[in-house]
Amino acid sequence: MTEAPAAVVLAAVALAALALSACKATPPGPRPIEILVPTDAETLDPRYATDAVAIRASRLVHAGLFRLDPDTLAPVPYAAHAFTWEDERTLRVELREGVRFHGGAPLEAADVVATIEAFRSPKVASRHARMVEPIGSVEAEGARIVRIRLARAHATLLTDLELPILRRDEAHGPPRPDGSLDGLGPYVVTTREHGEIALAPAPRGVMPPPVHHVTIRTVHDENARALRMHAGRADLVVNGFSPTLLPALRDAHALTVSTRPAASLTYLVVRSDRGPLADERVRGAIATAIDREGLARTLLGGQARAASTLIPPSHWAHSEAPPFALDREGSRARLAAAGLPHLRVTLLTSTDRLRGVLARAIAQELADVGVTVDVVPLELGTMLARLASGDFELATLQLPEVTEPNVLRVFLHSTSVPPAGANRGRVRDPEVDRLLDEGDAVLDPEKRRAIYAELEARVRERAWLLPLFHEDHVTVASARAAAFAPSAEGRWLGLATLR
């Protein structure tokens, strides 16, 4: 099936907008703020939520001891009032006074203890058990003090304690995908139906009650999302439009298009333990054959930065590195030195239209240096299964939330080769392992930044993962939601402060 040219799509959207212009004039009233998403949340139970929509929706309903600064992503107190490291393995946390769950029960230290125990309980089988695995013990001291002792030094504990706190009598209960677990966040789930989640301002919690109700509506097709925004029936879309649609949305009356740097990474994963890509000269040739700046400027509409590092520039742990030089002659020379002046590989990508266009553009650039690329679009689940089994050579992937540099452990450490983790490239490098272990154990942020800078240099030198872009968050908003901005990792807590 062929895709409609961008001009045709834009014209269709414009005509539909004119036909629906009467709807656009509907004045703001009690209608909820409606945010459109491309896929349904799998579950609203924070113990099991892993997809982006589920994580973002559940964090509107629930709150942890800490949250992430919306710009730097450094952990800051949330349900916690204060904290002290008594030594490198003992954290003392004081809870905020007067905080209550939506149902009215006071937040107490026993709730935190029960939550951590539930997240690591085999009976609960939380998908986030690894986040609390380093904790040796957790104890309540009265109603407001929690003491957490680590089984081993673990630098990311504060970030890990972003996990939502559950009421002690619900923490070990059966799954509640409908979102009915009592929470501490600014919203409470009123209904969850197929394609729609309705949220109401919570009467109590860690934040003052929001002004607006919120509806999270699933609309799979981006043209349908554009029509709904043009018609004034929806208020927000974050990262839901390809660059070809943005000009028409910018020209629309009462719609605002805004961008902000995102804590994301688009990259190429390389099957590096076998075949021609096991040769780092071949991987290096691929790395220097791609015009990142040109692709970011054109296909991504300037809403991305060419990536020279894995950790995004806005992140507290980022260290500068020179951009990847576009060096096609050098790429050809590396391939010739490896005895592979002509090479054929497959490149897996998702069925998303923009991802497919990017993959085909990368294939063309690699063809210019003698690498023939067969682009294979796959549904995400099928692609991830092939990556896990090792049935690939190259693949384009995204990390939408690089919230903590220790996440690189899941993608690069030798103990994280599937099925144990997401080291899909099968990287097995003792130096990479050592640096990841040190980054996990050292508490001092400046020392950690230096460790991850050394890790970045090692990964770049060996071309284990090939960073491509740090894509911006692009928000399309109605007039009543124009003040909204997602956080650096793309979450929606800003909904709670709209007036």
Image (spheres, rainbow, N blue to C red):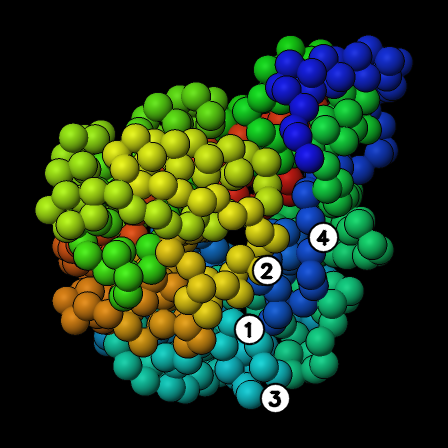
Badge 3 amino acid:
Lys
Q: Earlier in the sequence, mark 2 or mark 1?
A: 1
Q: CA distance from mark 2 to mark 1?
A: 17 Å
Mark 3 or mark 2: which is in front? Answer: 2
Q: Is residue 109 left or right of residue 410?
A: right
The picture quadrant where one finds residue 423 is bottom left
Residue 132 percent coordinates (x, y): 44, 76
Q: Is residue 137 left or right of residue 310?
A: right
Badge 1 amino acid:
Arg
Mark 2 or mark 4: which is in front? Answer: 2
Mark 2 or mark 1: which is in front? Answer: 2
Dot label at residue 123:
3
Quick one: 347 or 495, which is closer to the camera? 347
Residue 178 percent coordinates (x, y): 78, 64
* Residue at 71%, 76% in the rendered image: 175
Q: Is residue 155 left or right of residue 210?
A: left
